[in-house]
Image (cartoon, grey):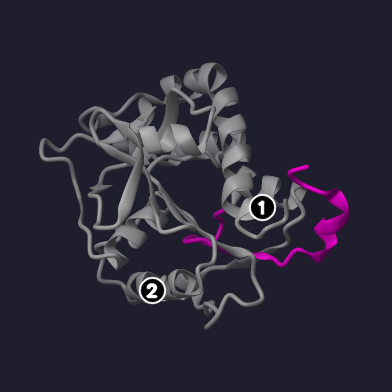
Amino acid sequence: MLDDPHRRRDRQPVLIVLHQERSSPGRVGQMLIEKGFPLDIRRPVLGDRLPATLEAHSGAVVFGGPMSANDPDPFIRTETDWLAVPLKENKPYLGICLGAQMLVRHLGGKVEPEPEGRVEIGWYPIRPTEHGRLLMRCWPKMVYHFHREGFDLPQGCQLLAEGDVYRNQAIRYGDNAWGLQFHAELTRAMMQRWVVHGAHRFIMPNAQQGRDHLEGRMIFDAPLKAWLSESLDLVFIKANHFA
């Protein structure tokens, strides 16, 4: 049995790192709670400190934000350097968009725009690699993006899924560090907010219009949601030996 409900009360919290005052862990947070993990939410950009060790945590999730992993802001450097903690302790780490780009920067890789200035804002196809297919059986064909930079593949990383405009879409480093360029965490309410507040980006090359974001959700979101649940089992439940 993958997940014994009777053992859930013993689970340590997952550290949740957000980058705006009103940011939410969305359905990543909802699913982790459903799977028995309390959430320890911190916002370093607002002054919250990150723990010196993850001994009291089941792992960490670092989410996205409108900033770049290349920005000079002190909290960007602090978070990027802090990733030494989960990597050294071999604790589960999941980086989403900015969180993945921070992982790449920490590992010595580059984060930069696509050479022609194209973005991924909306729904775009991905394809699992052989490594990805071996790890997970049900990859979605379309995923949701909201980014204007991508990352290369640092030494020691495995590529799990690739795309057309930005090749590196999902990566794994070591046993327990994972990075996603796309967003599976958005609830419908979150997507509606992103479409409203991010509308000025829809004129960028390769961006989709807001109506396509919401219409695409009706078509593509169910497989993405199912994949997210399986991914969280892989990252946090199997890694913490709860099976």
Q: What x and y, as percent, mark residue 243?
A: 72, 50
Residue found at x 60% / y 24% = 222
Q: What x and y, as percent, mark residue 142?
A: 43, 24
Q: What x and y, as percent, mark residue 137?
A: 53, 29
Which type of secondary structure does the marked residue at label 1 adopt?
helix
Q: Nearer the viewer, mark 1 or mark 2?
A: 1
Residue extending farthest left: 115
Q: Is residue 210 above or below residue 116?
A: above
The residue labelled by disc 2 is 75
Residue found at x 61% / y 38% = 230
In the rendered structure, which amino acid carries the disc numbered 2? Answer: Phe
Residue found at x 56% / y 33% = 227
From the viewer's perspective, tell me whether residue 192 is left or right of residue 172.
right
- Label at residue 237: 1
Nearest the eye: 172 or 53: 172
Q: Residues within 10 Å of mark 2 (few under 14, many from 20)?
A: some
Residue found at x 56% / y 56% = 22
Q: Is residue 11 magenta?
A: yes
The magenta-colored residue range is 1-24
Mark-to-mark CA distance, 1 and 2: 29 Å
From the viewer's perspective, tell me whether residue 140 is left or right of residue 152.
right
In the rendered structure, which amino acid carries the disc numbered 1? Answer: Ile
Nearest the eye: 120 or 87: 87
Q: Is residue 143 magenta?
A: no
Which type of secondary structure does the marked residue at label 2 adopt?
helix
Query: Does residue 15 show up?
Result: no
Residue extending farthest right: 6
Q: What x and y, as percent, mark residue 119?
A: 25, 36
Q: Quadrant of the N terminus?
A: top right
